[in-house]
Image (spheres, rainbow, N blue to C red):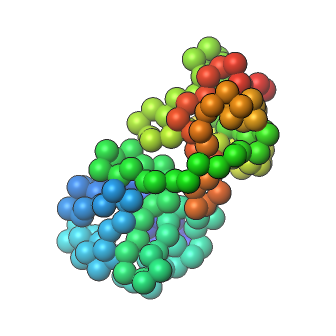
Amino acid sequence: MGKRIVETSKFLSFVLRHQPQAIGIDLDREGWTDIDALIAAATRDGRRLDRTLLDEVVRTNDKGRFAVSSDGLRIRAVQGHSTAAVALSHRALAPPPLLYHGTASRFVAAIMREGLRAGSRHHVHLSQEQATAASVGARYGVPVVLHVDAAAMAADGFVFYLADNGVWLTDTVPPRYLGR
């Protein structure tokens, strides 16, 4: 079942964060979609997805990427969206003094020159733990953990949000707030 959970998690990330139209589902402004509609669309797309597997993926996802609504009828990705249809409303919070961003070594020079940008996503993703940032960076090559002076950014008026899964979000991180 492990391989099937990983494959389903990747599929859910794709359709709930980036391309809901790939299987013909709609997301509301907060990223929610009806679970029955998702299962039916996935089935039409040739995916074996049922409520038991879906609940297992949500429950076991190590990064807490997905949430089921309190009534159990809808599902969403909690952050990382690139689709313009979704504009999650996060509550602004004061960040911890230091946050971390994991990247691959080949990107460091450009990041230190240009800062961190959201790119196709809605926000830059930051971690409160160095180990988490290192594992994110390792997905793209030799990992490098960058330090973000979140306290200075907040003092200068930058806004931070905390996603439901513990990922810190902000619009951009200029180079002056970055270190290694």
In the rendered image, the vertical position of residue 123 relative to residue 48, given as above or below? above
Q: Residue at x 46, y 54 (%)?
A: 89
Left or right of 33 in this view: 169: right
Determine the image quadrant of residue 96: top right
Q: How many marks?
A: 0
Above or below, 48 against 16 in this view is below
Specify whether residue 14 is in view: no
> Which residue is rendered at x = 63% and y = 64% of the image?
62
Q: Is residue 27 visible?
A: yes
Viewer-nearest residue: 20 or 124: 124
Q: Position of residue 67 (x, y in %)?
A: 49, 70
Furthest residue toward top: 113
- Measuring 71% from the left and 45% from the top, which residue is drawn there? 95
Q: Residue 80 placed where, x, y %? A: 48, 49
Q: Is residue 66 above or below residue 114?
A: below
> Which residue is more in the foreground, 124 or 2?
124
| Quadrant in which residue 37 is drawn | bottom left
Give the side of residue 180 with respect to residue 9, left or right.
right
Location of the C terminus by quadrant is top right
Q: Quadrant of residue 23?
A: bottom left
